[in-house]
Image (spheres, rainbow, N blue to C red):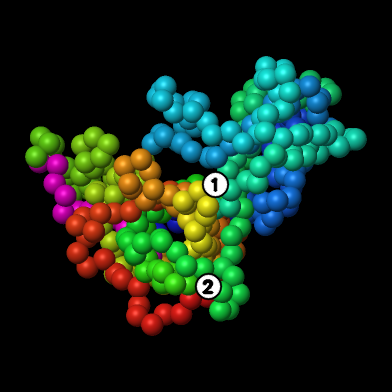
Amino acid sequence: MPSRYLLCLSFLPLLAGATGCKGYDSPPKATVVEAVDGILQDASAPLQIAFHEPVVRETLSVKLIRYETDAEGNLYDEDDDPETELDIFFEYPGPDGPDFPVGGEGAFSDDSRVFTIDTTGTLPIGPQLALLIEPGLADAEGNEWKVRQTLKFGYNFSCGGEGDQNPTAFPDAVHFMVVDVDAPISTQLQLLASMRVDPDTGAVVGQFTNADRDPAISCAPFGLSCDGTEACRTLPMPACVPPSEGAGTADEYPDFTFNDTPPTGYSFTVLGCVRDEEDGSFTFANAPVDVKVQSPPVTVIGINFNGSFAFDGDGILRGAGTFSSADVLLGTSSSGAGAGTLNSRVVPPEEVPAGTPSPPEGAAAP
């Protein structure tokens, strides 16, 4: 786990003790009702947004989207690429939107503190979703948001009961996973996940291993000389960077190799399941698992991944979804639940770093 994560965690007590400006009346704060660490349980139930105070109804403009970003973290209507656009499941007009809701119905509670969305279609389970509340949302006193609010969430998919049989076409492969952690502090984890699948049952046994920037890569062929404190990054363009620099996208896998050697490295076994969907995609979930890092001393309790995988136009199997954990311990002190997003892609077999840990033989599915 990157050391910068741990350094940031050490500042949490200081942040918790900070006080805000007295008398400040904030614009209406929004949350997703019944989301626990960014996860909802029932994709067929109406989706609700709660506000900490009544809102002026005419100022609400909201979109329900599949959460996708470019390498810089820009949503597809914020980036510079004219070929990318938001995948919108629902849109409520607001002052600048369409004349009526698109993709379902939206309604306020009598007190204007809850907005309920009932979509026409069932929302996907696995991918990271988000509610985009556009600037302008205001309360009766005129306190309004000047920036877009992004409320990320996803729906839980869990493995079936003992003996369930779900034949699958999901292939055995090694995936490079980029996990962007939003809580308890913002950071990124990179993992090489070797996954073995039982095609008759959908049971998955995986070995997830910490991935670090490969110190064996040299920038000399690119005319660069990195000093002993730097690593060579080849993608998206050659540069000498801090070894802790995260990956912009999962396509940067060639710059990373596994590190399973304590005290800084770690590797853990994941038991899960995969289900084939009618649209050709695959939904994945795992049984919660604890991970302990020796140095610095960090324990992540109850890690859970929920994801959706699909082949893109080039035949590359890519994944997107959510990351959560029940708690993150720094030493023996709790820092709170973990929550974030994950994106992944399959590493071509010929490019998998030699010696990448494989799942143990004989491990049982959950």
Residue 72 is drawn in which quadrant? top left
Is residue 356 visible to us here? yes
- Residue at the spot 58% in from the left edge and 33% down from the top edge: 88
Residues at marks 2 and 1, CA–CA distance in whole angstroms: 26 Å
- Tags 2 and 1 in contact by the CB under 8 Å rule? no
Residue 319, x across and y down, in percent? 43, 50
- Return the residue nearer the eye: 36 or 91: 91
Q: Quadrant of the N terminus?
A: bottom left
- Residue at the spot 10% in from the left edge and 35% down from the top edge: 223
Residue 172 is drawn in which quadrant? bottom left
Quick check: 353 left or right of 158?
Answer: left
Quick check: 231 left or right of 60?
Answer: left
- Residue at the spot 73% in from the left edge and 23% down from the top edge: 100
As drawn, the residue found furthest toward the top would be 96
Q: Which residues are magenta?
A: 208-220
Q: Which mark is residue 128?
A: 1
- Return the residue nearer the eye: 244 or 195: 195
Residue where numbered disc 2 is placed: 165
As drawn, the residue found furthest toward the right would be 110
The crowding category of the residue bearing disc 2, from other C-alpha atoms within 10 Å (few below 14, some 14 to 19, many at least 20), is: some
Which-is-in-front pick, marks 2 and 1? 2
SS for dot 2: loop
Tell me if residue 213 is in the magenta stretch: yes
Q: In the rendered structure, which amino acid carries the disc numbered 1?
A: Gln
The answer to whether 338 is drawn above or below residue 153 in the figure is below
Residue 187, x across and y down, in percent? 45, 48
Quick check: 176 left or right of 29?
Answer: left
Tell me if residue 19 is in the magenta stretch: no
